[in-house]
């Protein structure tokens, strides 16, 4: 069957919203996203129902759901099994679209890097000059940022000029952490800490109370302590940070990278069965990314 452009827009928006929310979608919701008259959307829904592409759900929480034929009609047979690839427009996540495909059109050009981004959803609300950020993609954890310089409403595609692109590391943090961990007792002194840091070429260490993690002390902490009048024999418990940021060894590195900036820290203690087994620092993360 041959659908009109507006029918394709409505159907693809319905599928996108239904995929995100897993509930019947009201016509007013679709009309608002597409900036269409709600009456127009309702009329087109009746036509799509007659074609067997849309099913109506009655009741106060009712609306419309796509039929299996709708996926087939729009060549989206794998979409129900797919994973959402989020898209930000000018810093705001878009709930009405999902990224289906990225085609790099000028990958080998010495000065330009352009791509065509095909969407599940309508491109009607995108404007030339919009800042775009998409990802991470499910397999390679690819993040892409750029600016819209064109769009193709028929093929639901955005043309973007890429300004930044990165693939986040996927291995567990146990592959990147420094181990074994050199720890201190909370009664150890500044002198002990400086000696430990110098001996092992480190800048911080977990502080223990018996077998329990009590805090963390860094070279900066000691410098601040000495600057405010503490002496070389002051116990590290006086200047240690008690709120320690920890993580298990089996989560992926990309899941914790953002915590360094968010929590303004330089290191995360990797803990297994309540015992520190490694440290992940900002320097460890920088080593992951290849030098240009």
Image (tube, grey):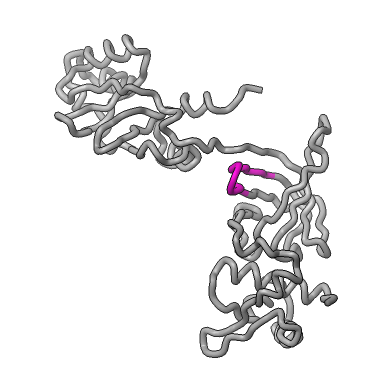
User: From the image, which quarter does the N terminus lie in?
Assistant: bottom right
List x then y, in percent, for residue 290: 60, 25
Toward the viewer: 83 or 261? Answer: 83
Give the answer, above or below, for where 105 lies relative to 205: below
Q: Is residue 32 visible?
A: no
Q: Quadrant of residue 143?
A: top right
Q: Residue at the spot x=62%, y=22% of the render?
A: 291
Q: Residue at the spot x=59%, y=83% of the render?
A: 63
Question: With 250 as the anchor, is 120 left or right in this view?
Answer: right
List x then y, in percent, for residue 254: 50, 40
Toward the viewer: 256 or 176? Answer: 176
Q: Quadrant of residue 227?
A: top left
Q: Residue at the spot x=69%, y=83% of the render?
A: 38
Give the answer, above or below, for where 99 lies relative to 282: below
Toward the viewer: 28 or 130? Answer: 28
Most extreme residue toward the bottom is 59
List x then y, in percent, for residue 41: 72, 82
Q: Is residue 104 visible?
A: yes
Q: Is 31 inside the magenta-drawn segment?
A: no
- Main SS, magenta region, reads loop
List x then y, in percent, for residue 13: 68, 70
Q: Residue at the spot x=77%, y=54% of the render?
A: 158
Q: Which portion, as a residue range, is magenta? A: 135-145
Give the answer, above or below, for where 214 lies relative to 39: above
User: From the image, which quarter does the C terminus lie in?
Assistant: top right
Q: Is 140 inside the magenta-drawn segment?
A: yes
């Amino acid at each position: 069957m041959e659908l009109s452009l507006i029918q394709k827009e409505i159907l693809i928006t319905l599928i996108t919203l239904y995929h995100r929310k897993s509930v019947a979608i009201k016509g007013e919701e679709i009309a608002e996203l597409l900036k269409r008259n709600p009456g127009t959307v309702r009329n087109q829904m009746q036509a799509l129902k007659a074609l067997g592409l849309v099913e109506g759900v009655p009741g106060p929480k009712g609306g419309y759901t796509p039929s299996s034929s709708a996926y087939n009609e729009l060549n989206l047979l794998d979409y129900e099994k797919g994973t959402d690839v989020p898209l930000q427009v000018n810093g705001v996540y878009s709930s009405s679209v999902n990224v289906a495909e990225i085609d790099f059109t000028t990958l080998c050009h010495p000065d330009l890097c352009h791509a065509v981004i095909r969407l599940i959803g309508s491109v009607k609300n995108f404007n030339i000059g919009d800042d775009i950020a998409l990802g991470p993609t499910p397999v390679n954890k690819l993040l892409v940022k750029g600016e819209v310089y064109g769009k193709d409403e028929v093929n639901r595609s955005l043309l973007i000029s890429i300004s930044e692109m990165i693939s986040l590391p996927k291995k567990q943090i146990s592959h990147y952490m420094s181990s074994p961990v050199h720890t201190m007792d909370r009664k150890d002194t500044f002198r002990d800490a400086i000696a430990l840091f110098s001996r092992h070429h480190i800048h911080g260490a977990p502080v223990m109370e018996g077998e329990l993690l009590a805090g963390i002390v860094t070279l900066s902490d000691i410098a601040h302590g000495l600057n405010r009048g503490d002496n070389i024999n002051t116990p590290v418990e006086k200047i240690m940070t008690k709120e320690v940021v920890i993580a298990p060894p089996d989560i992926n590195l990309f899941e914790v990278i953002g915590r360094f900036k968010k929590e303004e820290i330089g290191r995360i203690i990797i803990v297994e069965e309540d015992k520190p087994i490694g440290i992940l620092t900002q320097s460890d993360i920088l080593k992951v990314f290849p030098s240009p």
